[in-house]
Image (cartoon, rainbow, N blue to C red):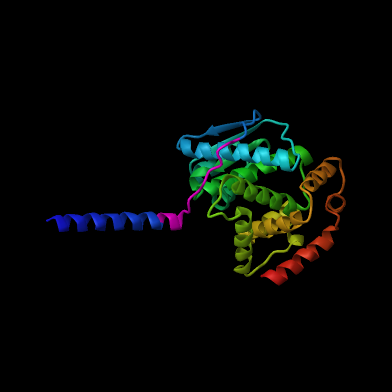
Amino acid sequence: MGGVFIRRIIFDLIAVFAIISLYLWVEPPIFIVAQLPPFPDEVKIVAKPGVSSFDVSIVRRAVCLTTRLLEDNYSLALGHDIEIILVPDAFSYSVTLQQDENLSRDVSLFQGSHSFGTTNNNHIIINVGGIAGYNDTLFVTAHELTHQYQIAEAGQWNRLNWLMEGMADMVAAQVVNENTVTHGENEVNKYRFSWLTALRSSHDKPNLKKLDSKHDWLLDFQNNGAVTYRTAGLAVLNLADSRESASFRTYMNALRDGVDAEQAFQSAFGVSCSAYNQQYEDWLANNL
C-alpha cells in the first residue's frame, strides 16, 4: 500500500514538473525591474469596459519606462497632454477609431484588422485584448508613445517615414530590454534577429525608397504587412549603432524649423539619405 502511495506521489510530481517545464519553454521567466520612474503628469489612461487591471498595469509600466528612456537617453520632451485609450478587442478598436477618433470607416477597419495601436492627434488607442503577451503590450505602448514625442519635437512630417516608424520600433525594443532580462540575453539583439528572420522569409523585401512618404508607407504595409516595419526597424537600429542618440532629436528639431527632410537627415546623421539607403541595401544583401 505504501509503495503504491509513493509511486502516485512520484507520478504527480513528474506531471507537475512537466507542466512547469512546458510553460517555461513557451513563456520564459520574466524578471521585472524593481524601480519605476514616476508616472508622467501629461499622460492619462482610460480603460474601456472589458480591459483588465493587469493590462492597465502593463501599459502604465510601459509609459513610465518609455518616458524615462526618451527623456534621459534621447533628450526629448513630451510637452503636451495625451490620453491612452485601452480597448478589449478588435471590434471595439475599430469602433473607437471610427466613432470617437473620426477616422474613416475604411481606415478604422484596416487598422482594426492589421494593427494593435494607433496614434491620432493627442490620443493613443490600443487593443490590449488582441495583444498576445506581456512584452508585446510593452512594445506596442512604447511604440505609440514614441510617436507622441516625435510629434512634440518635429510637428507633423510626410517624408522619411521609415525613420520615424523605425525609431518607434527601436525605442520599443529598448523599453522591453529595460524592463526584462530573459536568460541574460539582450532583448534588442533578440528583436534584431527576429526582424532579420522575418525579412529572410519574405518574398518581397521593401527598401527604404519605397517607405518615404506616409502614402508610400501605407501602400507598402498593405502589401507586405509586418515586413514593412521590420525593414524600417532594422534600418534605424543599424543607423543608431554608429550615431549618438541625440542625432534623432537634432533631426526632428530641424524638421520643426522647416528644414527639408533629406537636408535634416544629412545634418543630423552625417550621411545623405541616398548614401545610407545604399549602405543599408548592401548590409541586407550580406545578411539575408
Visible in this render: residue 23? yes
Could you say where residue 7 lies in the image, as x and y percent from the top left?
21, 58
- Measuring from the top left, give residue 239's x and y in whole percent: 76, 56
Closer to us: 265 or 185: 185
Left or right of 74, for residue 18: left
Q: Is residue 82 left or right of residue 32?
A: right
What is the magenta range? 23-36
Label count reads: 0
| In the image, farthest residue toward the left | 1
In the image as oriented, which residue stretches furthest toward the front?
2
Quarter of the image where the C terminus is located: bottom right
Q: Is residue 32 magenta?
A: yes
* Magenta highlight: main SS: loop
Q: Residue at x 81, y 47 (%)?
A: 251
Of 267 and 148, the residue lying toward us: 267
Above or below, 50 relative to 202: above
Q: Residue at x 64, y 28 (%)?
A: 41
Residue 230 point in image, percent of width and height: 65, 59
Camera-side residue: 9 or 121? Answer: 9
Query: x, y (%) of residue 273?
Result: 83, 58
> From what the image shows, is residue 93 above or below residue 281?
above
